[in-house]
Image (tube, helix red, strand yellow):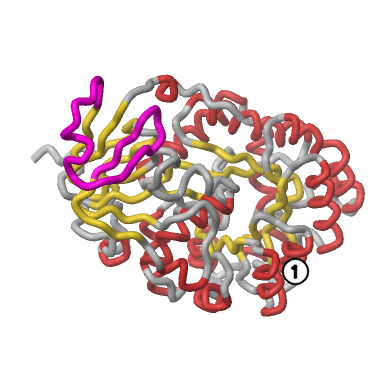
Amino acid sequence: MTKNYESETQTGRKIVTNVGQLVTPEGRESVSGSGMNRLSVTSEREILVIDGVIQEVGEVGEFSDRELEETEVIDAQGKVVLPGFIDPHTHFVFSGYRSEEFQKRLKGRSYEEIAEEGGGIVSSVSSTREVSFPKLKEEGKERLRSMVRFGVTSVEGKTGYGLDRETELKQLKVMRELETETPVDISSTFLGAHAIPEEYAGRREEYVDFVTEEVAPLAAETGAEFCDVFCDQGAFTVEESRKVLNRGKKLGLKPKIHADEIEATGGAELAAEVDAVSADHLLKASDEGLNRMKESNVIAVLLPITAFSLKESYARARYMIDLGLPVSLATDLNPGSCFSESIPLLFSLSTLYMGMTVEETITALTLNAAAAIDRADQVGTLESGKQGDFLILDAPDYQHLSYHMGVNLVERVVKRGETIWERNGPNF
């Protein structure tokens, strides 16, 4: 998908100087094991960005002392600079909210009980089907703006709240237009196999055929890059999921999978079998499934805010990292099980309750997240040849990302060398 956002046409030189602490993983593919804990941390640095791409990283004064015409200087004022965050699993294009479901869960009802009574995923379908295209697009754009404030510069978005031809394609078209009209890089995923819609009740096989034969080809033509399926108890079986993902592969859609969130049904094993880019959730994934994912280099995308919201046990991040799996993190922003785009909350849960170090968490939200959307050659680190996507934090040290709990430390967000959000100080 080709962007035409106006900032991309603004060529020129940008220098980020007076970087107190430059923090970045390194490489152009996912890292695992001890590699996730390995960051390059240097002081008194500056970055030269030309036409949106990082050219060099050097010492303060190395570029700013040169006589470069038409050069914009961004003064980091001695603060922390790190790569833009990447959110590789969201459902940000939807309409309608489910706050009443959340209240029921607060009173002790389970997500599964609510879904059986007509709530859950299918309850978001009618409002998303009925909303106009302009309204759906504006709602998605507002959520993008909020994500940017938390430092997200690239995001993956899924369909799955249409479950019919028209609305699934409507969601994809919204993402395609937002990709071209906003600075955020958006990777689109076709998730027609998210749930069985009411009109196909009792006709599972027909719905799977409808998704694979009628909608998936159109999704590929409409800009989808990935094909996803919810493979779990109460959702789609391993056999159904295999059919969906293999059909997607034939259409050029790279496989992803919602796997083993509710029960260990074999989703992790299937992810390895079909060479999925990532398997996501994995709360109940088996040791065998995780070992197979490791052998196939499938990235584990963990979603701790969802487990937090549902009061479920967290995925075994420490076990997975020690096993040698490349681990990424994502918000899972959606209207039901996880209505949150909060990166600070994600940091707190990952470090306090999932056994991850702050270094591993940064890697999981940058380089490994880039790999989870097949973009590690373009974004996720601050190295020559990568896009000039970075954040300036209002903090003296990167460890404040977990230490200053629940607080958004992002002061400035830069995409391809252009400032796309900047926090103004209080008026007092």
Q: Is residue 68 magenta?
A: yes
Going by the numbered disc 1, the residue's amino acid type is Glu
Q: Nearer the viewer, residue 339 or 248?
A: 248
| In this picture, residue 118 sits left or right of residue 26 | right
Q: Is residue 61 magenta?
A: yes
Q: Quadrant of the C terminus?
A: top left
Q: Position of residue 21 (x, y in %)?
A: 23, 55
Is residue 333 placed above or below 213 in the rendered structure?
below
Residue that mark 1 sits on: 269
Q: Position of residue 320 (x, y in %)?
A: 56, 74
The residue depicted at 47 percent of the width and 45 percent of the height is 379
Is residue 392 placed above or below 25 in the rendered structure?
above
The residue depicted at 21 percent of the width and 32 percent of the height is 73
Q: Position of residue 421 (x, y in %)?
A: 32, 35
| In this picture, residue 348 sits left or right of residue 333 | left
The residue depicted at 41 percent of the width and 57 percent of the height is 25
| In this picture, residue 349 sits left or right of residue 60 | right
Residue numbers of the magenta segment: 46-71
Q: Position of residue 202 (x, y in %)?
A: 89, 54
* SS at circle 1: helix
Q: How many residues crowd around disc 1 within 10 Å: few (fewer than 14), some, or many (20 or more)?
A: many
Q: Nearer the viewer, residue 28 or 140?
A: 28
Q: Is residue 99 visible?
A: no
